[in-house]
Image (tube, rainbow, N blue to C red):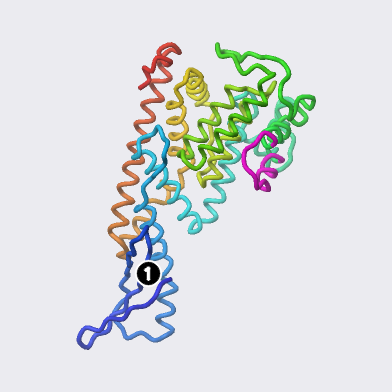
Amino acid sequence: MVYIIKKRIGEELYYYLNHSVRVDDKVKTLSYYLGKGPFSQSEIESLVKEKSQMILLEAEFFKVFSKRSDYKEHHLPSSFINILERLKEINRIMAPFNKSYFEKFEENLQLRYVHGSTAIEGNTMSLRDAQLILEEDTPAGNTLREMHEVLNYKELFKFIRSYRGDINLKFILKIHELLMKNIDDENAGTLRNIDISISGTDYDPTPFPLLEDEINNMVDWYNEKKTQMFPIELASNIHQKFVEIHPFIDGNGRVSRELLNFILIKNNFPRLVIPFDRRGVYLRCIDIGNSGDIVPFIIFISGLLIEDSFKPVDIFFEQLKAKLINEHYSSEISKELDNTMSDYKEILSIIKGMEGRIENLNINELRKGKWK
C-alpha cells in the first residue's frame, strides 16, 4: 500500500510517496518525491492517484530483479534461466499498462501458432486464409483437410481455456480427438494399433502394445519433475518424449506442440510459435534429441521465446525507460532494465550462432555433438 510521508525542514514541508515491498525476509522502502507543500487534501489525493501506479510498478520490478532461479534440475546456465524468468515477469507486469496492445499481440501469436503448426505438417494455407477460418468462419484453403486442420484449433482452444486439470492420458487423447476431427474420425482420440516408422529418420517409435504404458510413464515423469525443473526445459522434454513415443497414426507433431505450449502457459510463459521457415532446425533438434541430447532443442525453444513471444518487452522497453528517467523514478530499476535487455540481446546472439551450426552440419556431426 502507498502512503504519504511529510518531512519538515526548517519552515518548509516536503511530501514523499512511500511504498514498502518485502523480498524474502527483507523489507525495502521505495520513496518518490512529490514536491514542496503545503498541499490541500484534494491535491494530495490527485498526486497519489497520479504517481502511485509507477511506484507500485517499481515495487514489482524490484521483486523481479531480486529473484534468482532455484530449480533443482536444469541444463541451461543459471544466467540464461534468470533472463528468461525476468522477461516472463516483465511481460506480465507491463501487460496491464498496455492492455490493448498485449491482447492484440496474443491474438496474433495464436493465429501464427496455428498457421505454423499446420504448415510444419504440410498444410499449404496462407496466414490470411487461416485468419479467415479462425476469425470469420470463412471457408478457405486448397482442400477440406487443410481447412479442418486449421478450424479444429477453435474447438481445441475453447477446450483448453475451460480445462482445469493437468497432463494425463485422457487429456492427450482429447487433444488428438479435437485436432483430428473431420480429418481422420476413425483414429481421432485413439492410440494406434499398428507399428509405424517416422519418415526421414532412422528412429523406431514405441511398439503399439506398449503405448499406453509409455504415455503413463511420461505422465509420471512429468508429475515428478514439474516442481523441480525449469518450465521451458520441462516443456521441451515432454515434447521430445512424446514424439519419440509417437502414439498416433497421424497428428503427433501437433499434439506434441500443444503439450509444450500447455506447460509454458501453465507456468505463465507466453505461447510459442514455431514458424515454417524454422522447420529444418526444429526437426534437426528433435533428431538430436532422439539420440539422447535434449540441449539443442531446449536452446532452440528458448531462442524462439526470446526472439518472438517476448517481443512486447522489447517494444515497450524504451518507453518505460524514458518514463523512469524523466520522472526521476528509481535509477536502480533503470539500470537493471538496461542490464536485462543487454543480456537478452547477447543470449539471442548466442542462440542464433547455435542454430547456424545446426543448419550447416550433417546429421552424423550433429549426433556427435559438433553443434556445441
Circle 1 Cα neighbour tier, 10 Å, few/some/many (<14 / 14–19 / ≥20): some
Image side of residue 120 versus residue 177, left or right: left
Give the image location of residue 120, x and y in percent.
Answer: 59, 25
The amino acid marked with disc number 1 is His
What's drawn in magenta, residue-wise?
Answer: 155-170
For the N terminus, the image quarter is bottom left
Please tell me which residue lies in front, 295 or 56. Answer: 295
Give the image location of residue 191, x and y in percent.
Answer: 71, 25
253, above or below 152, in the image: above
Which residue is disc 1 drawn over?
A: 19
Instruction: Tell whether position 22 is magenta.
Output: no
Q: Residue furthest left?
A: 10
Give the image location of residue 251, x and y in percent.
Answer: 66, 26
Q: Residue furthest bottom?
A: 11
Give the image location of residue 31, x and y in percent.
Answer: 32, 69
Our reading of the magenta stretch's main secondary structure is helix
Image side of residue 270 versus residue 24, left or right: right
Image side of residue 248 versus residue 230, left or right: right
> In what element is the residue under mark 1?
strand
Please tell me which residue lies in front, 96 or 132. Answer: 96
